[in-house]
Amino acid sequence: MQIEYNRFFNRPDGGKSEHVKVICDSYEALETAIQTVNGLFTVDLGDIPFEEPPPRTPARPAPASQREQARGMACGMCGGDTYDNRAKKAKGEYGATSPDFTCKDKSECNARMWLNKDGTEGDWKYPKV
């Protein structure tokens, strides 16, 4: 049985990475070969100039309306799933005065919500009977 070992090494000078393929007949021979290969590509880190990476700026959280859109809005009255009507309103399929979100539970809840002008969540309301 032959055992194959493949390893890619990044060059310290930033050049093309090196590929080393070792084929051995036993695990003992493979272990020795791996140690030899790793020794060939060992680099003294003291010889490589090191620059501190620039500080990472924390990611700015998305506005509330985008976060809600990404995870789905829960009904403000019953906590159930809702329909997001914003895309249909934008296409003109629904009127401009239609709610932005409606509860999917039409039999028990049927609540509706319009976003505020700044895109934040507005008040949930039941339809007039």
Image: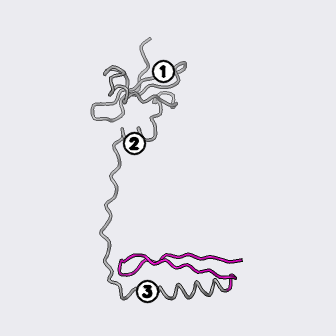
Q: Earlier in the sequence, mark 2 or mark 3?
A: 3
Seen from the viewer's position, the closer of residues 11 and 125 is 11
Q: Marks 1 and 2: in contact by CB < 8 Å?
A: no
Seen from the viewer's position, the closer of residues 39 and 63 is 39
Q: Earlier in the sequence, mark 1 or mark 3?
A: 3
* SS category of the residue bearing label 1: loop
Q: Residue furthest right?
A: 1
Which one is closest to the eye, mark 2 or mark 3? 3
Q: Quadrant of residue 117?
A: top left
Tell me which segment is drawn in magenta: 1-28
Q: Is residue 107 left or right of 48 when viewed as pictured?
A: right
Which one is closest to the eye, mark 1 or mark 3? 3
Residue that numbered label 3 is attached to? 43
Q: Quadrant of residue 115?
A: top left
Q: Is residue 6 magenta?
A: yes
How far is mark 1 from mark 3, CA to CA? Answer: 67 Å
Residue that numbered label 1 is attached to? 110
Mark 3: few/some/many CA within 10 Å (<14, 14-19, 20+): few
Q: Residue 40 in the image: x percent, y percent?
A: 49, 88
What residue do we see at 65% from left, 82% from top?
24
Residue that numbered label 2 is attached to? 67
Q: Amino acid at mark 1?
A: Asn
The image shows residue 101, relative to residue 37, as above or below, that is above
Q: Amino acid at mark 3?
A: Val
What residue do we see at 31% from left, 30% from top?
116
Q: Marks 3 and 1: in contact by CB < 8 Å?
A: no
Q: Is residue 129 left or right of 22 when viewed as pictured?
A: left
* SS category of the residue bearing label 3: loop
Quarter of the image with the C terminus in it:
top left
What residue do we see at 48% from left, 25% from top?
103
Q: Residue 95 in the image: x percent, y percent?
A: 33, 19
Q: Marks 3 and 2: in contact by CB < 8 Å?
A: no
